[in-house]
Amino acid sequence: MADDQQPIIIKKIVKGGGHHGGAWKVAYADFVTAMMALFIVLWILGQSPEVKEAISGYFNDPTGFSMPGVEALKKDPTMLIEPEIDEQILFREREKRRLEQMGDEIVNDIAGDSEYLGLMDQIQVEIIDEGLRIELVESSEDVFFQLGSAQLDNKAGVILKKVGHRLSSLDNLVVIEGHTDARPLTSRGGTYTNYELSADRANSARRALMTGGLEESQIDEIRGYAAKRLKDKSDPFSLVNRRISIIVKFSEKK
């Protein structure tokens, strides 16, 4: 066959990927980046001059060692927190330190009297979510109440008076809790339960605290938990479950 009679073959090459290509992804990424930058700028505009100086210093010198603004930010990270939240955090920290100091003073008062040195293991002081908790926990060596009774032992009464004297210097509200073990009461015809007993013991503690100087206006709540808040859950009948808890509540910022 002659060359001029050869069939003509046409090849078509289709370029591009998918129906729309990938250009939209680049445009979307640019849009998201621009929005993020806008939000950052708006956030910066609402900050204090010190924070703005610190941020400016960072972008001028990312190492942060030569810019006073960044150094200030390192010393006080709370600069980035909203002023209202910042004040609340600082107030709670001051309250915590103040109550911790009060707890130390109470422990020192009791430890300073040689007659009560043997009871120090039964006096537990700690900061909890609600405030400062002071607990008088019974043991096999020393009990603060006889079985089924709300009558305070003399030593426990003196300790509570010391606590009341210290707490009278505060304006914080106080909660007093009574706790029993899980032994059911068999006397008084079954009408007097551990709920009544724990509440009566808390009230006995309240009277001793007030004798020491605690003001009635400081009493916020009297709670009788019976055996519903066991300290030793593995042994509901353990003596350590029998205790008085005094909670000095954190003050609220006004």
Image (tube, rainbow, N blue to C red):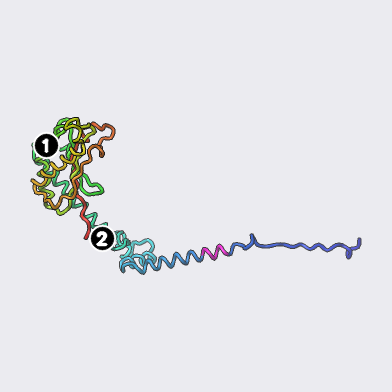
Is residue 249 or residue 37 the one in the foreground? 249
The amino acid on which the numbered mark 2 sits, given as a three-letter code, is Glu
Is residue 151 or residue 132 the one in the foreground? 151
Q: Is residue 169 above or below residue 134?
A: below
Q: CA distance from mark 1 to mark 2?
A: 45 Å
In the rendered image, residue 212, in percent from the top left (x then y), is placed at 8, 46
Element assignment for label 2: helix
Element assignment for label 1: loop
Q: How many marks?
A: 2
Disc 2 packing (10 Å; few <14; some 14–19; many ≥20): some
Q: What's drawn in magenta, residue-wise?
A: 24-29
* Residue 151 marker: 1
Magenta stretch, main secondary structure class: helix
Whether the magenta-drawn stretch holds residue 33 is answered as no
The amino acid on which the numbered mark 1 sits, given as a three-letter code, is Gln
Residue pictured at 39% horizontal, 62% vertical:
62
Q: Quadrant of the N terminus?
A: bottom right
The answer to whether residue 235 is left or right of residue 98 is right
* Residue 87 marker: 2
